[in-house]
Image: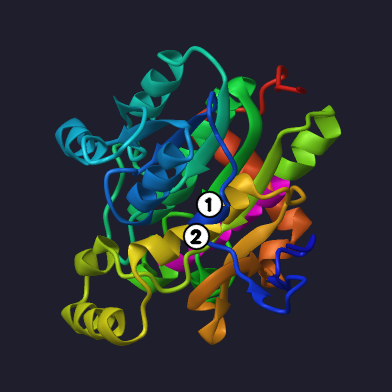
Amino acid sequence: MDTTGKAISSKDGTRDTWDAGRIPDLSGRTAVVTGANSGIGFAAAVELARAGAHVVFAVRDLERGRAAAAKVSGGTEVRRLDLADLASVREFAEGWDGPIDLLINNAGVMLLPEGRTRDGFETQFGTNHLGHFALTNLLLPYVTDRVVTVSSGAHRMGDRRIHFENLNLDGIYAPQRAYSQSKLANLLFTLELQHRLTESGSRVRSLAAHPGWAATNLQSHTANPVTRFLMTMGNKVVAQDDKGGALPTLFAATEDLPGGSFAGPSGLGGMRGEPTLVGRSAAASDVVAARRLWEASEELTGAVFPLAVAAR
């Protein structure tokens, strides 16, 4: 594998592909995976545990989390975390003790009807971005290796900007607009987090990944029945399975990649295939917007970049 993450040819001329079998030994390491009870989060948890990591399932529903963890061969633990409730995020962080080698911000909601989190934020922005923003900052003193945040190719869709003047999209709400804004926020968060880690002298890395089109239960929860039907058909015709969708996350979590990297599928327009490094949109590379979003997120959540960041 070269430093760009692209597959290279081996000495005998065969193509050197990247799959879960390339994950190194993770014995003695701890990985926290949000939303690990289903979809690509579960698929990632399975492979991390298989490689020897102790995997913490950070999930909203403890019963479902325990049922999922029971299917995994390896060391697991289940803890409650509701990203749509900042009190739950703080409770999770306050109950933590010990190093976290990998924090994987995977959980998310997609294309929901208009709604609000417990703290009054638009549901997709509040869950996908603000919940993970607060969780990461609260846990960062324990993180020793990297933070991987799962975004989406949908960050290139919608208005392709953060509505700073109206983050809740009051009066202009549309499921796709809200989802795209939350996924763009994920990438801007990753960018600014890496900047702050570098400035603080920390060796912790911030990376992002997107699964391409993976057939998961997210598509079944969309607001529009027509959209649900089209996505169901797309799942059957275009999508890769959740194991394939988890590969970019695992690639970002275990390969020696530079901070700020963005991993995604290499084939079919970025919708499926083995993982590689991919590009961000111009909006997702805007350092001014990234800083502004960070400052707004601190104000909204009360979570700030910690002075004590692991520098190991």
Q: Would you say residue 148 is visible in this rendering?
A: yes
Measured from the top left, where is residue 251 in percent x and y? Answer: 59, 55
The residue labelled by disc 2 is: 247
Give the Cα separation between the discs numbered 2 and 1: 5 Å
Instruction: Find residue 266 and report its horizontal and vertical position in percent.
Output: 59, 76
At mark 1, the secondary structure is helix
Residue 132 vs residue 88: left or right?
right
Quadrant holding the N terminus: bottom right
Say left or right for 11 vs 232. Answer: right
Q: Is residue 233 magenta?
A: no
- The reply to whether callout 2 and callout 1 are in contact (CB within 8 Å) is yes
The kind of residue on which mark 2 rests is Leu
**In the rendering, which numbered label is found on residue 10?**
none
From the viewer's side, name the closer residue of 301 and 68: 68
Q: Is 240 or 232 nearer to us in this picture? A: 240
Which amino acid, mark 1?
Leu
Query: In the rendered image, which quarter is residue 89 located in?
Result: top left
Residue at x 29% of width, y 78% of height: 235
Q: Residue at x 65, y 76 (%)?
A: 15
